[in-house]
Amino acid sequence: MKLKIWFLETRPQFLLLSVVLAFLGAAIAWYDGAFHLGHAVLAFVGLLLAHISVNVLNDYFDYRSGIDLNTKRTPFSGGSGILPASLLSPKQVLWLGLGALILAVPIGVYFVVIKGWLLLPLLVVAAACILLYTPFILRVKWPEWSPGLGMGTLPVLGAYFVQTGEYTWPAVIAAIPSGILVHNLLLLNEFPDTEADRQAGRRTLPITMGREKAGIVYSVLTVIVYLWIVVAAVLTIMPWWSLIALATIPFAVRAIKGARRPQEMDRLVPAMADNVMVILITQLLLGIGYILGGIF
């Protein structure tokens, strides 16, 4: 039973994001003619550990700030519920989060040694996004950029770099949608927690500009993701097969409709579910598009 509680504290339902990020980065590298299965698996493990650290440390700091005691939990927001239920102690959760990050460090060091020091700045920035997000970045205007960068764009580029040993502009352009999508994942999931976050001194977009305007930002950025993919494919920066990612547009339309009605929880919660589908399936299809582009 205790092991199950530790597992649930990692918020496993969100860890699928690491799978698709690692897959997309490796698929882009494969398209460019570089792929090593062992490195792909090891990079995924490192990313998964970093993601676990993000989830657990966020849970710890939310509990310490009192936010988790004031939020209305949904399947997509409000924390794991482990700490408010006293199933684990704050100290245990803190060490779980720090331990996951510490375990990821040797993997990063290994890749820096074998692939080059240019990976180091990426890892440092990503680690800073993890450690500073909840205690500091959330108290600055527009904090959503941090997970967008640290758990979106940079992981894709990192998974690409460990295969190729370099960064390329086409790879950067291909990784930008991931950053926007993860940004939007956090943004929409913040809507139900607006009042609790405000009381804790946070400055998320739903707080600083209001949920209605934040819903507009979410909608515009979602449209930009699809336009980005179309333009990159037309300019042959991304393979034409990447256009299969447009198949998630129906999910995006429903998510946008919910985001534009943020006061209605019966619309917002299904929109949050659709948003998760957009984030995961769009990136999965992009990776498949790169593989198909390399084959055909």
Image (spheres, grey):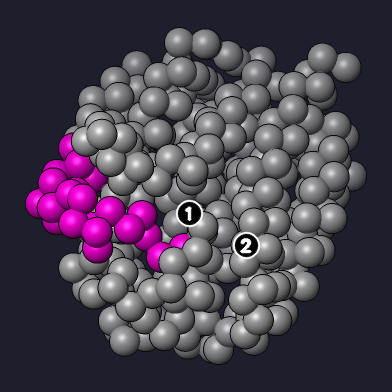
Q: Earlier in the sequence, mark 2 or mark 1?
A: 1
In the image as oriented, which residue stretches furthest toward the left?
A: 91
Give residue 146's position: percent from left, percent from top: 43, 60
Which of the two residues, 119 or 259, is positioned nearer the viewer here? Answer: 259
Q: Amino acid at mark 2?
A: Met
**Image mark for residue 188:** none
In the rendered view, would you say 293 is above or below 17? above
**Amino acid type shown at disc 1:** Leu
Residue 107 shown left or right of residue 24 in the figure: left
Local SS, label 1: helix
Q: Position of residue 276 (x, y in %)?
A: 62, 52
Q: Nearer the viewer, residue 217 or 251?
A: 251
Image marks 2 and 1: residues in contact by CB distance under 8 Å: no
Q: Is residue 241 magenta?
A: no
Q: On the image, numbered disc 1 is attached to which residue? A: 149
Specify whether residue 266 is in view: yes
Please tell me which residue is depicted at 58% across the width and 84% down the height of the picture: 211
Extreme residue toward the front, this view? 1
Query: Residue 108: which quarter of the image?
Result: top left
Please indicate, yes or no, whether residue 122 appears anywhere in the rendered image.
no
CA gap between label 2 and label 1 equals: 20 Å
The magenta stretch is 77-100
> Which residue is label 2 attached to?
272
269 left or right, relative to 156? right
